[in-house]
């Protein structure tokens, strides 16, 4: 879990994100993007800092989920995730979350319960991986393609279901082919949705965010 105070287009903001790494060495160093309880408690502290100083929160999610090890559970992984989600929902400042790669389970929601949820075109966001879902429902990981279809985990599916707010187009071949262009597209999307949120009073921000998530699931599947 990486975070701190920075600037976005000249405005002071608090930035939070899960770092997955780009090669074997960096992925091992960052635990393959799977945060431990301490990471979620760090996120909660930074959200509190943002609220105290009136700084917008920008979060970036790329994780298969929270670290599931026994030691993480012993140190309160579930409580840490729940507290981070609560901090998202009660933050008195605008919170814009962007799914930039993989958004897995509560480990992703802990940073993504925001006023606006953006998602890169080829990213995925789901309660469980297709392999995990297939192992539970069909007792066969080979049924992962069938599970992926049922999970509706693509950006466009999630937009249609009202679970995310906007799909951000990626460069031809995917964001990894042209990182600078992908970063620019994400920046433009954030810049477009942030000003209206800045105009809202904290009480209204929190109320509308709460209603946004309470309404999820009521639309139904077609």
Image (cartoon, helix red, strand yellow):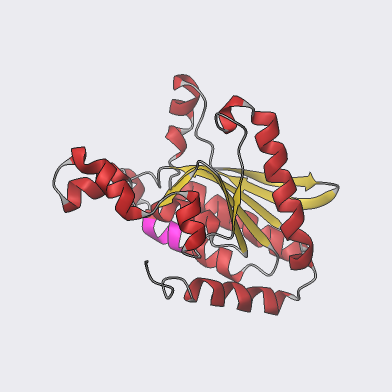
Q: Quick check: can you spot residue 76?
A: no
Q: Residue furthest right?
A: 10
* Residue 80 painted magenta: yes
Camera-nearest residue between 158 and 126: 158
Q: Residue at x 55, y 29 (%)?
A: 173
Residue at image coords 40%, 43%? 64
Q: Is residue 24 left or right of residue 128?
A: right
Above or below: residue 161 compared with residue 75: below
- Of residue 139 and residue 52, the one placed in the foreground of this image is 139
Residue at 55% in and 44% down:
121
Q: x%, y% of residue 160?
A: 49, 61
Horizontally, residue 100 falls left or right of residue 189, namely left
Q: Single out the residue that lies furthest toward the left.
A: 139
Quadrant position of the N terminus in the picture: top right
**Principal secondary structure, stretch drawn in magenta:** helix
Q: Quadrant of the C terminus?
A: bottom left
- The residue sitting at the front extreme is 222
* Place of residue 17 in the rendered image (x, y in percent of width and height, measured from the top left): 58, 45
Residue 27 in sight: yes
The residue segment tinted magenta is: 78-82
- Asked if residue 210 lies left or right of residue 197, the reply is left
């Amino acid at each position: 879990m990486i975070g701190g105070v920075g600037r976005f287009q000249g405005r002071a903001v608090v930035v939070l994100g899960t770092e997955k790494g780009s090669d074997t060495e960096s992925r091992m160093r960052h635990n393959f993007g799977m945060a431990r309880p301490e990471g979620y408690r760090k996120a909660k502290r930074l959200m509190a800092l943002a609220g105290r100083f009136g700084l917008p929160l920008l979060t970036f999610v790329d994780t298969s989920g929270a670290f599931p090890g026994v030691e993480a559970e012993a140190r309160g992984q579930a409580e840490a995730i729940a507290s981070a989600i609560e901090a998202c929902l009660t933050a008195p400042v605008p919170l814009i979350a962007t799914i930039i790669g993989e958004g897995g389970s509560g480990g992703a929601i802990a940073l993504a319960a925001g006023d606006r949820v953006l998602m890169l075109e080829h990213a995925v966001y789901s309660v469980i991986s297709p392999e995990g879902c297939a192992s539970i429902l069909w007792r066969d990981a080979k049924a992962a393609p069938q599970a992926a279809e049922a999970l509706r985990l693509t950006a466009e599916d999630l937009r249609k279901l009202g679970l995310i707010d906007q799909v951000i187009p990626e460069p031809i071949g995917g964001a990894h082919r042209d990182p600078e262009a992908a970063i620019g597209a994400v920046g433009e999307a954030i810049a477009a949705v942030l000003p209206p949120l800045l105009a809202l009073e904290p009480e209204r921000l929190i109320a509308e965010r709460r209603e946004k998530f309470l309404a999820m699931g009521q639309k139904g599947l077609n």
